[in-house]
Image (cartoon, rainbow, N blue to C red):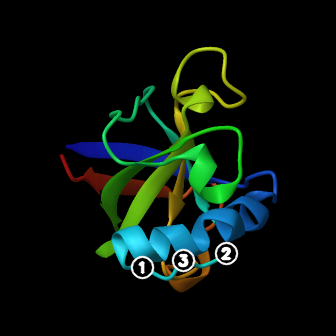
Amino acid sequence: MKLTGKVKTGLGEASYWVGKIKNIFERKYNMKLYLGTLNVQLEHEYILKQGQKIKASEYGGNLDVLIQECEIMGHKGYIVRTEKNNKEGGDHPLNIIEIVSDLPIRDAKHLKDDDEVILSIKE
């Protein structure tokens, strides 16, 4: 599946939250995460499947974090979203996704706000 969207600036809080799941993520998915996310505003709402997740009890949080593997500009990444934000009434609209990876995608791929990106979602 392909998703199209535009790069957007986030709230600047991702490094804190990625830091909380970093060690668990490395153990489960064998990737050392960069402490930040790439925010993408999709053309349409997107709901992550309830398959892969990091449970709140694993990182000391209050919400499970859903994980969906993807590829962006030829690089492997993962969409991460709390269960609360994966349904109507969450803190973020359903057309906003956050992507984690082992590198700062925005800088590494020379992206700026409103640049269009295409993601391939691993089903």
Residue 106 left/right relative to 47 = right
The residue beneath circle 1 is 31
Is residue 111 in view?
A: no
The residue positioned 33% from the left and 43% from the top of the image is 3
- The answer to whether mark 3 and mark 2 are in CB contact below 8 A is yes
Amino acid beneath label 3: Leu
- Mark 2 and mark 1 in contact (Cβ < 8 Å)? no
The image quadrant that residue 34 belongs to is bottom right
Residue at image point 71% right, 59% down: 17
> Which residue of the protein is positioned furthest toward the front in this rendering?
57
The residue that label 3 is drawn on is: 33
Instruction: Tell me where residue 38 appears, x and y as whole percent.
Output: 58, 61
- Which amino acid lies under the numbered mark 1 shown in the image of this protein? Met
Q: In this view, does 80 lie to the left or right of 13?
A: left
Nearer to the camera, 59 or 86: 59
For label 2, the residue is 35
Q: Quick one: label 3, few (<14), some, or many (20+) residues within 10 Å?
A: many
- Residue at x 58% of width, y 56% of height: 58
Q: Residue 94 carries which label?
A: none
